[in-house]
Image: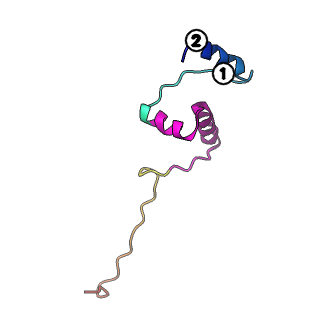
Amino acid sequence: MNMKERATDAESMPADKVEIAVHLDSDLLEQIQHLTNDPSKVIEVAIRQWLRGEILRDDELTRTPHRIPIPPRGEWND
């Protein structure tokens, strides 16, 4: 991105927006870029959802383990 593009981006940014620098994993950025050409939109929506508590995490640390019931002694299908 050259200086001319940065100036154009800053001019087109709404007054209520603030520009910040964020360090992201390159693999994560690549996945975001498959969704949109404007990663800041994805990040902004994710932060809003997180602040409202709307994110439903689905990873190994947040899942409730599902126990498989064991039949009582004598009811095994041997």
**63 to 5, vertically: above or below:** below
Dot 2 corresponds to which residue? 3
Q: In this picture, which residue range is highlighted in magenta? A: 28-57
* Label 2 packing within 10 angstroms: few (<14), some (14-19), many (20+): few
Q: Amino acid at mark 1?
A: Val
Instruction: Point out residue 52 in the picture as x, y percentages from the top left corner.
Output: 65, 42
Q: Residue 45 appears in which quarter of the rendering?
A: top right
Q: Are marks 2 and 1 in contact (CB under 8 Å)?
A: no
Q: Amino acid at mark 2?
A: Met
Q: Who is closer to the viewer here, 64 or 24?
A: 24
Residue lying farthest to the right in this orientation: 15
Q: Who is closer to the viewer here, 7 or 60?
A: 7
Instruction: Point out residue 63 in the picture as x, y percentages from the top left corner.
Output: 46, 55
Cα separation between marks 2 and 1: 18 Å
Instruction: Point out residue 68 in the picture as x, y percentages from the top left corner.
Output: 38, 71
Q: Who is closer to the viewer here, 30 or 76?
A: 30
Quadrant the C terminus occupies: bottom left
Dot 1 corresponds to which residue? 18
Magenta span main SS: helix
Q: Residue 35 appears in which quarter of the rendering?
A: top right
Residue 18 in magenta? no
Residue 43 in magenta? yes
